[in-house]
Image (cartoon, grey):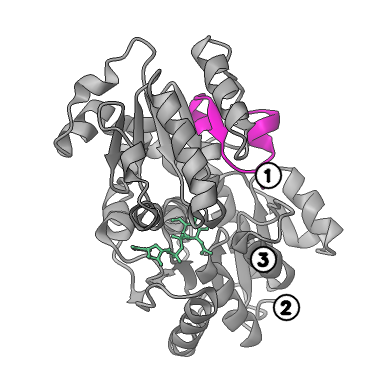
Amino acid sequence: MTPPAAMPTMPIGPVMCVVGARPNFMKIAPILRALAAHQPPLPALLVHTGQHYDASMSDRLFADLRLPQPDLNLEVGSGSHAVQTAEVMKRFEPALDTHRPSCVLVVGDVNSTLACTLVAVKKGVPVVHVEAGLRSYDRKMPEEINRVLTDQVADRLYTTERSAAANLQREGVAAERIAFTGNVMIDSLLACREHARPAAATLQAHGLDPALLAHPQGYGVVTLHRPSNVDDAAALRPLLEVLAEVAAQLPLVFAMHPRTRINIERFGLGGLLRPEHIAVLPPQGYLEMVGLMDGATVVLTDSGGLQEETTALGVPCLTLRENTERPITVEQGTNTMVGRDVQAIRTGVAEILAGRGKRGRVPELWDGRAAERIAADLYAWLRAGTP
Ligand code: UD1
């Protein structure tokens, strides 16, 4: 699919930027700023599908990231994958008809990413995918399906690490459609780091005693939300048990996703989280999360974004997943894959507490200027009217 040929003097239609779920917000914020700062400016429209809707999962991040209010909120809410994807598609189509954008720009790998991509390509609107080409090669992950399908039909693909282009080319994506522009998530991290909220203030704000953090070894941060870890009691229980063990040596701050909180209650596992060792918090704002990570001794997570953010911050990360679509965080960064292997988790923490955690280095083009490179490339691409 090629963008419509444009005469050099013709105005470029709006870039319709899509967000749906929490990890999209930190990716789109620097892109919107870079489109506005580009000379000449690229007009943009922000569409929120409403996949995430709680104040803690959405509004709060908009404020922290200084995101403008969306031009359009599709308010799809939660549902099964089919229902959620279908609802986004149904509600996105008329928005495309009304606004007639020059292209649709999607980020990441959530259901909203794929849903809007499918609608746009079938209507002949060019699709731009930011964070293309990442692969876990685990098709049981819904995000992997979203990534593979989005990349197959996207017209312009921006990558965060060099391995992504090789993945794409193996799937038949032409090299000319791909540009290595760096990591927009790290643009947000670097822009917000100095405004981050100190961890003690975050605990206090939730009525918790910050003395918990004053341990000689520091503290660890935990996030868990992957269905494979939290939807099944047989997977979740041993993870919470080993976290309780770790917490007896190193206090933990657990910023809990709604999916995880609901399941812990449902399975009756709340008793494993002893408040004298583990501070359980609701999902945190971006400035709180950056402050928590930046001061941590270790981060234990199954998030994709946190693997990258800890690498950029130089904080050791233990990833509670069997695979990662972000291999550079392991090869160059601070990330170690421990899966659901409780012994690997114990050993990983022990190594870090013994001062042998990975220091890592910051990967190529994770320099805070990825969005700027995307805006420059996108402008040239839309102007040229060819991929
Ligand atoms: C989604 C993304 C995942 C991303 C994650 C970050 C897909 C397939 N998954 O997973 O890649 O890492 O977001 O959070 O798109 N809920 C609320 N409030 C909200 C949103 C959700 O309480 O604002 C609860 C609901 O019970 C909902 C559940 O969380 O059913 C799951 O939400 P959903 O958007 O389906 O998936 P996530 O697990 O958040």
At a point 53% along the width and 69% down the height, the residue shown is: 111
Label 1: element kind: loop
Label 2, label 3: how many angstroms apart (C-alpha)? 21 Å
Q: Position of residue 223 (x, y in %)?
A: 43, 42
Q: Left or right: where does residue 334 sit relative to residue 195?
A: right
- Is 99 located above or below residue 217 in the figure? below
Q: Amino acid at mark 1?
A: Asn
| Residue closest to the far left | 207
Q: Sort mark 3 into few (<14), some (14-19) or many (20+) by Cα contacts within 10 Å.
A: some
Is the Cβ of the residue at disc 3 closer than 8 Å to that at disc 1? no
- Is 107 located above or below residue 6 in the figure? above
> Which of the image's four quarters has the N terminus?
bottom right
Residue 171 in which image quadrant: bottom right
Mark closer to the chain start, 2 or 1: 2
Q: Position of residue 131 (x, y in %)?
A: 61, 54
Residue 114 magenta:
no
Q: Amino acid at mark 3?
A: Ile
Q: Amino acid at mark 2?
A: Met
Depth-wise, is mark 3 or mark 1 nearer the camera? 1
Mark 1 lies on residue: 323
Mark 2 lies on residue: 1
Label 2: element kind: loop
Residue 330 magenta:
yes
Q: Sort mark 2 into few (<14), some (14-19) or many (20+) by Cα contacts within 10 Å.
A: some
Q: For ligand 1, which image quadrant applies? A: bottom left
**Which region is colored magenta?**
310-333
Is residue 320 at all visible to an observer of this figure?
yes
Mark closer to the chain start, 3 or 1: 3
At a point 65% along the width and 55% down the height, the residue shown is: 158
Camera-nearest residue between 387 and 295: 295
Mark 3 lies on residue: 145
> Which of the image's four quarters has the C terminus?
bottom right
